[in-house]
Amino acid sequence: MSQAKSQPDWSADELRRAVKSAGVALWTWIVDDDAFFMDAKAYELWDIPVEEDLTFEHLSAKVHPADRDRVRAAFVATRAIDGAFEIDFRILTGGSDVRWISARGQGNEGDAATNKMTGIFLDVTGRKQAEEGHELLAGEMSHRVKNLLALAAGLTNITSRSTETKEEMVLQLMQRLTALGRAHELVRPLADGQGSAALLGDLFTVLLAPYDDVGAFAGRIRVAVPRMGLGERAATSLALVIHELATNSLKYGALSNDTGLLDISGTLSEEDLEIVWSEHRESGVNTGSTTEGYGSKLLQRTISGQLGGAIDYEWVEHGLVVTLRLKASRLAG
């Protein structure tokens, strides 16, 4: 039967190396005269010059104003008790930079007569930033879900009033929700200066791709818009607009036959994005309630309310020209 190995006796040099490698800073607070002693790592961590007469009050001035009272109260409270304690707080380093510190120690070292506290400081900035990032992400996801649920409820309401049978309502509602889903799939971080969600051209290309496959004449949809990024809300709103225009075209316009053509072009100025949706049919004219139905009301509401713009219809021989004028400032949101 083997004997248990005895614990090694670590030398002072080994302990110093271990403390240094772990990024641990040492401190001691003499409560009676408020004297505070720290090692070189602690001075570096607090971003202050080495001083012979450092006090707890002097060190407290470096604590973030929002945390200062809490830190003082916690340290004072440990005077009356023995045992371990731990508190995380922010300090102000050079300029306005903020660093998170975790103070861990032992009150009175288990002996109230010493009136001394010892412990360590740890830099926990990375962990705190990660926690804040997770909280922001959770909040962002909650906000997105609420927005999508509200939008789905609104679409359900307007679709129920524009259809006569439940089958027709299901079909239209599924199409609109699918358009939103495709737009949501495009939402992703973009390169600096290009926005925060989806590229304008990608949005048109993805949402119109199913219509381009209808009929014998492939490639009848042509898109030439400025290369620019859209924010999440703008991408979602514009996806609805594209879907409604394409649906109208499929029912009454250029996409209702095999020979119709759809040209989409755009120009961007400092204040506005203008998109021209131009349909052409070989025969017949566009018909339907393009400017009177519930789909049109949805278009008007989305463009004027959410995108800060306007929509104009111009009936031409064998076709229709729809002009969208959108506020560039709204497209980044």
Image (cartoon, rainbow, N blue to C red):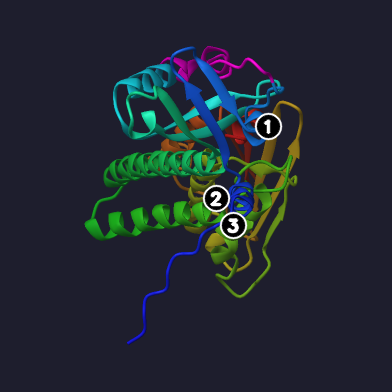
Q: Secondary structure at mark 3?
A: helix
Instruction: Identify which amino acid the numbered label 2 is placed on.
Output: Asn
Q: Position of residue 194 (x, y in %)?
A: 71, 43
Q: Is residue 41 above or below residue 221?
A: above
N-terminal label among 3 and 1: 1
Picture quarter with the C terminus: top right
Q: Position of residue 85 (x, y in %)?
A: 37, 34
Q: In the rendered view, does 272 fall on the left or right side of 15?
A: right
Q: Is residue 63 visible?
A: no
Q: Which residue is mark 2?
A: 286
The image position of residue 23, as x and y in percent, is: 61, 45
Q: CA distance from mark 2 to mark 3?
A: 8 Å
Q: Residues within 10 Å of mark 3 (few under 14, many from 20)?
A: many
Q: Earlier in the sequence, mark 2 or mark 3?
A: 3
Residue 306 against residue 224 in the figure, above or below: above
Q: Amino acid at mark 3?
A: Ala
Decide whether residue 56 is among the magenta residues: yes
Label 2: few (<14), some (14–19) or many (≥20) C-alpha neighbours in 10 Å:
many
Q: Please report the bounds of the magenta region as a residue range.
A: 51-69
Nearer the observer, 204 or 265: 204
Residue underneath mark 1? 44
